Image (spheres, helix red, strand yellow):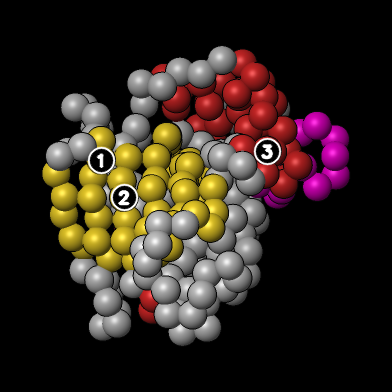
Amino acid sequence: MWRTPTRSVLVLVSSWFCLWSLCTAADDVEGEVKIEVLFKPLECTQTSKKGDLVNVHYDGYLAKDGSQFYCSRSDKAGHPQWVVLGIGQVIKGLDIGMTGMCPGEKRKITIPPMLAFGEKGKDPVPPSATVLFEVELFTVSRGPRSMEAFKEMDLDADKILTKAEIKEHLKMSYEKGGKPRDDPHYEKIIADIFYKSDKDNDGLISAKEFNIYGHDEL
């Protein structure tokens, strides 16, 4: 995944216009993130905000010539990416552009250089490049690693997350977003989650392993 040089944050799981466009002003003076909504579900009960955990696919292109420099569908076995909004896990323009999205929504996000890869660029993105991202958001959940998120998944309240509990939570999230998937899809995501979070490789995710921020009592 393309990231700013801030510390990488491991994240876990959770819930998930072709005709309209809108522009969202950035907090920075260097430019503006432009958002074109390509598709938006008729029903939207939850939108993404800073601190939320979102599950997305996104493709990156250079605005100058349309050449593709990143595709999440071919990176990391093609799993959708888990991203926490607003903490610098992705470039700032994506943090801005993915805010306010509904599960199932698709956007085209145009990002100026200073909210993307800056004056130096990042191979294969050249210096001072404006970039475009096509984003499809699948799920939105409350802030990751929180007491609320853990308890929501911990069905038997034993302070341990099993693969079955996470799978059930994933299924509910995808079904709520109107995009149910087959078992192989869930198994791939679960494998990725345990690879990142099951530090002692015991097939379970403890409250301590889950709560990497250490700011909640679980």
SS for dot 2: strand
Q: Nearer the viewer, residue 90 or 123?
A: 123
Figure check: 133 above or below 80:
below
Q: Nearer the viewer, residue 106 or 172?
A: 106
Side of 164 where 127 appears, left or right: left
List the single residue furthest toward the top: 182
x%, y% of residue 102? 30, 38
SS for dot 3: helix
- Please tell me which of labels 2 and 3 falls first in the chain: 3
Q: Is residue 203 magenta?
A: yes
Quadrant in the picture for residue 133: bottom left
Say what amino acid the circle numbered 1 marks: Leu
Residue bearing the label numbered 3: 77
Say what amino acid the circle numbered 3 marks: Ala
At x 54%, y 48%, the residue is 71
x%, y% of residue 22? 16, 54
Figure check: 111 above or below 172:
below
Say what amino acid the circle numbered 2 marks: Lys
Residue bearing the label numbered 1: 38
Figure check: 131 above or below 68:
below
- Packing grade of label 2 (10 A; few <14, some 14-19, many >=20) is many
Tags 2 and 1 in contact by the CB under 8 Å rule? yes
Q: Is residue 129 magenta?
A: no
Residue bearing the label numbered 2: 108
Side of 38 where 62 appears, left or right: right
List the single residue furthest toward the front: 65
Residue 46 can be seen, yes or no: no
Quadrant in the picture for residue 162: top right
- Please tell me which of labels 1 and 3 falls first in the chain: 1
- Please tell me which of labels 2 and 1 falls first in the chain: 1
Which span is picked out in magenta? 198-210
